Amino acid sequence: MKFFFAFIFLSIVVTANLHAQDNPPKANAPSENLPSTSALPKEIVGMSAEFFKLMMVGNTGEAFQRLLKNSPIGDKPEQTKRLTDQAKRAEDIYGLMKGFERVGSESVAESYIRLRYLALHDKYPMRWIFTFYRSPTKGWITVNVKFDDDSEYFFSKE
């Protein structure tokens, strides 16, 4: 009899887990507005990928320099240095970045898009959020960069 109840309980747990894998929690962004990578402008996907690839080999300064090219943030050396220093401190705490995954995106308009990423480190993931603006004269530029270790905010509230 105990075996029967254990089997039923195990069946319920396995079924629930299989269902959870089919329906993973949604990112903390409007899912109906999440374009696929192919629907996003290639320029900003490329800028983000280049940034993370440079971070993964320890070129933090160059990563920010390229990401912030033509950006109002890049025009402020003290702000760029502060971002670079904070990213280096994060590397000291969590280890060098080993990979990255796009978590989601939002667009306010065709010219104003936010991309969210999860950076993979040995000790803990980090959350990165880039906001891009398509300037009529400069093309795509980064107008905001945020990063922290609050990656739990990617999960929906349960």
Image (spheres, grey):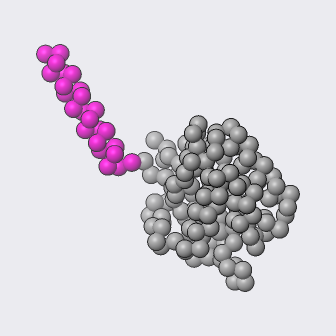
Given residues 59 and 143, the one toward you in this image is: 59
Q: Answer with the quarter of the image where residue 18 lies.
A: top left
Q: From where the camera sits, is residue 35 visible?
A: no
Pick out the residue farthest to the front. 57
Q: From where the camera sits, is residue 149 visible?
A: yes
Q: How many marks?
A: 0
Residue at image x 55%, y 64%? 106
Spot occupied by residue 131 in the image (x, y as percentages of width and height):
65, 64
Given residues 158 and 119, the one toward you in this image is: 119
Q: Answer with the quarter of the image where residue 78 lies.
A: bottom right
Pick out the residue farthest to the top. 2
Specify whether 72 is left or right of 34.
right
Residue at image x 29%, y 44%? 19
Q: Is residue 21 magenta?
A: yes
Pick out the residue farthest to the bottom. 137
Spot occupied by residue 69 in the image (x, y as percentages of width and height):
74, 70
Please name the predominant secondary structure of the magenta segment in the image: helix
Specify whether 81 is left or right of 118.
right
Q: Which residues are magenta?
A: 1-24
Above or below for 51 versus 10: below
Residue at image x 34%, y 43%? 20
Residue at image x 55%, y 51%? 99
Q: Is residue 12 magenta?
A: yes
Given residues 55 and 57, the one toward you in this image is: 57
Spot occupied by residue 112 in the image (x, y as percentages of width and height):
62, 72
